[in-house]
Image (cartoon, grey):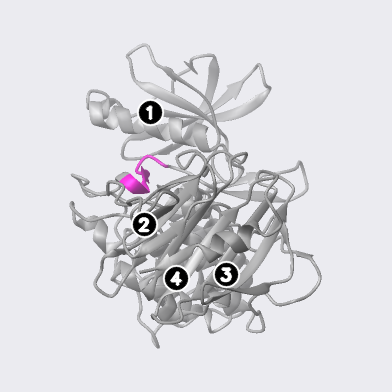
Amino acid sequence: MTAPQRIGPYAIERLLGVGSFATVWLGYDPALDAHVAIKVLAENWSHDLRVRERFRDEARLLRRLEHERLVRVHTVGELPDGRPYAVLAWADGGSLRDRLAAGPMPGPTALRLLGEVCAGVTVLHRHGVVHRDLTPGNILFHSTGAGSGAERVLIADLGLAKALAAASGLTARAGTPGYMAPEQDDPGAVIDARADVYGLGRLGIRLLAADPVPVPADPPRAGVLRLRAGVPAPVAAVLVRATAHRPADRYPDAAALHAALNRATDPVRQPPSPGPVTRRPYRLPLAVAVVAAVAVVGAEPGGVRVERDTYAAGPLTVRLPDGWSATGATWAGQYGVDGAAEPALVMSPQPRRWAADPRVPGAFVGVSTSTAARTTPAGFLAERTHGDCASTPARTTRQAGVEWTVVTYHCDQGRQRIVESAGRHPDRAALLYAQIVPPVDGAPDFVDTLLAGVRVR
């Protein structure tokens, strides 16, 4: 392949990689005095409108998300022959595929890396996006300081990524064999965050297994997976669950998987308990992921207004604060024993905006029988920590017959206060969950009043 001399204003130095749909070149930006990666749509796909649109979608998506754990997009353009290209930040540390080709990593190093990858995928899930192609070639490294040796893990190649609410009804197989979740072989399957959990589990096995596990062979089962030296034994059970064949048997999203890895590597870790305000810089932030990533999946809003100030989604009913409205139907990623998505809703003065706009207060409320079967309210909240925020001591409050555990997070950026709360229904085997962003000028009892209005019919 002959390297072009220039692409747009960028001088081309060498080839970085070739994929199924694109070629990536190392370019030099004289204006910024910096190297960039330039991703160009492959010539043999240039006339396929669907592939062209998918190429552009990736650039738009990365630009919209704009996060330090994702590869950044500087700009887009077109070659003289009409092929689109995207100018990306250059990951000067190469890929995980390159490093694995050079030999295995020390177990503790590989375990920390898996946690970093989980954190990056959680950014996608928090914004309602499922990657669908998590492989070693799509995990990149970027130096964060000259000569410091520090680097950042980046998630790349979002060309297959889809919004969770629109990830069903695919017409073509999507993903890399061995890392691709089994349901991705079914053109009509609903593809949600649990497909990425499977890919993360396969990455974990590739990084941490003591015995080589051929890809695309099926992952090892419980009692068979042996881990390398320096990796705590409980991690094996986490990876086995993450790579379960049935999506319902996996962790619901990357945040839950990361939390499980944290618990497996620190057996004395406990759910939130009374104590001084602490910062947890290495716990994965869910932020408002529950709303953005798992609010509504492939369904028209199914809630109904029961009374003037109430709203219902399935058996779930809430009393609305003054000036608030609600929307919602199902809790994506949460499935009951019958395989149906479990009910949830979003309520806010502006329900369609509150997940994306930190200035808008609101709440996500859901009810789950499957979660109640696997964990306690305190345990569920331990999976929903906000790593960049300070937590106050957990408290309990009894509202409408439900004993709620409540943890409040105070944050320096974005939303100033996020309240995580969960309780077990006294008469049903069901867990109630509410993530609340109170109004800045809300009454001191706003949270308790909102929880008092949550009912399951």
Picture coordinates of residue 165 (x, y %)? 33, 47
At label 4, the amino acid type is: Ile
The residue sitting at 64% across, 46% down in the picture is 439
Picture coordinates of residue 323 (x, y %)? 53, 42
At label 1, the amino acid type is: Arg
Describe residue 123's horizontal placement relative to residue 428 as left or right: right
**Residue 103 seen anywhere in this rendered image of the structure:** no
Query: How packed is label 1: few (under 14 Cα within 10 Å), some, or many (20 or more)?
Result: some
Q: To which residue does mark 3 refer?
A: 381
Describe residue 70's horizontal placement relative to residue 61 as left or right: right
Picture coordinates of residue 186 (x, y %)? 19, 56
In the rendered structure, which disc, 2 or 4, sits on the residue that comes first in sequence?
Answer: 4
Nearest to viewer (mark 2 / mark 3): 2
Nearest to viewer (mark 2 / mark 4): 2
- Cα separation, mark 2 vs mark 1, equals 39 Å
C-beta proximity under 8 Å, tags 3 and 1 = no
Identify the magenta region. Answer: 158-165
Query: How packed is label 3: few (under 14 Cα within 10 Å), some, or many (20 or more)?
Result: many
| Mark number displayed over residue 56 | 1
Q: To which residue does mark 4 refer?
A: 205
Q: Secondary structure at mark 3?
A: helix
Q: To which residue does mark 2 refer?
A: 312
In the rendered structure, which disc, 1 or 4, sits on the residue that comes first in sequence?
Answer: 1
Nearest to viewer (mark 4 / mark 3): 3
- Cα separation, mark 4 vs mark 3, equals 27 Å
The residue sitting at 74% across, 76% down in the picture is 274
Toward which corner of the image does residue 48 lie, by quadrant? top left
In the rendered structure, which disc, 2 or 1, sits on the residue that comes first in sequence?
Answer: 1
